[in-house]
Amino acid sequence: MAGIYLHIPFCKTRCIYCDFYSTTRSELKTRYVHALCHELGMRKEYLKGEPIETIYFGGGTPSQLEEADFKRIFETIRENYGMEHCREITLEANPDDLSQEYLKMLSSLPFNRISMGIQTFDDTTLRLLKRRHNSQTAIEAVRRCREAGFQNISIDLIYGLPGETKGRWENDLRQAIRLDVEHISAYHLTYEEDTPIYNMLKQHQIEEVDEDSSLQFFTLLIEHLQNAGYEHYEISNFCRPGKYSRHNTSYWRGIPYLGCGPSAHSFNGATREWNVSSIDLYIKGIERNQRDFETENLDQTTRYNEFIITTIRTIWGTPIEKLKQEFGNELWEYCRKMAKPYLESRKLEEHNGTLRLTREGIFISDSIISDLLWVD
């Protein structure tokens, strides 16, 4: 099985915290969709005939595309890869794009999962972040998704935002739970260089939350969502039983995927590729049949490190036998030696043939992962 990721870089406006590649040049949409479909055709051998299980439209703002754009993309995927094995087809969307008419159109297409970037239900903070929606718009968008027949809805939240308090974060969590969606992703705000919010921080216009508060917010996240019946299946991801994101889980399980569009990454087990982070260079390269990309051949050490980073962050953990088979006894013995202190302090545990984080270990996951990595 394999997955396809399609980067749709268009945004009406830029959010001040985002460092994903995006553009507001909507006049390029037609040329871009043509180039994207051309790339899908050019690279049909990359996945070596593996059946496609998941398709993910990410961004940017994929909900800026129109029906004709989606139909053309799906037609191209069917022709080159087939869709008969697809189990999950996700569209990332902004709440204010999800009108009744737009959702009716989406429900006529193969999409069966909507991932909505809500971030917070605090209207003052939404305005600060330059989000286009307010809290009521987000709540109504979830309701309209249900009315349109979508039974697999995910929402994104961000905590540790400027001015975050325990009360405000708990209000966000309570509202998210009331929506009764199938999946919730929650990420701590990261101040990425060259973003407007990073510049605001450096100019002392806003303050970063302290470490104790961050720990408290993460604890509240876990407690509220687990008490509401959500499974904590990955450090930042929670779901109703069985409703985990199949596409994102494929990244953590080392399943091959093809990424198309500017800045999109691809992985086939032995190499990693990424396209140029420029819509102009991307389109021009594809139109000349000379895709502008870089590639990295993954040696055993790199593959081992990626294996640790991706597998141990999930509820399924790092499979010990697979680690031994793919990387040999030397790396397994190293992993076991480095894991021993965490096993003794019950931050890690061996469970059903895997090495996985305990509840206590999740809070220091970065340190544990760092210690398990092989450093030349």
Image (tube, rainbow, N blue to C red):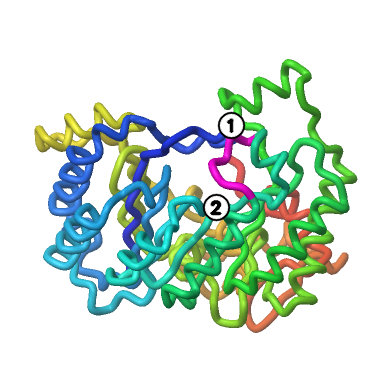
For image coordinates 47% across by 33% down, the residue present is 13
**Mark 1 is on which residue type?**
Ile
Identify the image quadrant of the N terminus.
bottom left
Q: CA distance from mark 2 to mark 1?
A: 14 Å
Location of residue 22 with respect to 112 vertically, above or below? above
Instruction: Name which of mark 2 and mark 1 comes first in the sequence.
Output: 1
In the depicted view, which residue is nearer to us: 352 or 89?
Answer: 89
In the depicted view, which residue is nearer to us: 110 or 84?
Answer: 110
Identify the image quadrant of the C terminus.
top right
For image coordinates 41% across by 51% down, the residue present is 58
**Mark 2 is on which residue type?**
Gly
**Residue 369 picture location, percent across and down:** 68, 53
Q: Which mark is residue 16?
A: 1
Mark 1 crowd level (few <14, some 14–19, many ≥20, 10 Å Cα) = some
Q: Which mark is residue 98?
A: none
**Residue 306 picture location, percent across and down:** 52, 53
Q: Which secondary structure is most common in the magenta stretch?
A: loop
Number of residue marks: 2
Magenta stretch: includes residue 131? yes
For image coordinates 64% across by 70% down, the residue present is 179
Q: Which residue is mark 2?
A: 117
Say if residue 334 shows up in the picture: no
Task: Indicate the secondary structure of the residue bearing disc 2.
Answer: strand
Task: Indicate the secondary structure of the residue bearing disc 1.
Answer: loop
Q: Which residues are magenta?
A: 129-134
Say if residue 172 shows up in the picture: yes
**Residue 320 picture location, percent across and down:** 59, 73
Seen as rendered, the residue at the extreme top is 203
In the depicted view, which residue is nearer to us: 85 or 228?
Answer: 228
**Residue 199 picture location, percent across and down:** 65, 20
**Left or right: residue 376 compared with residue 120:** left
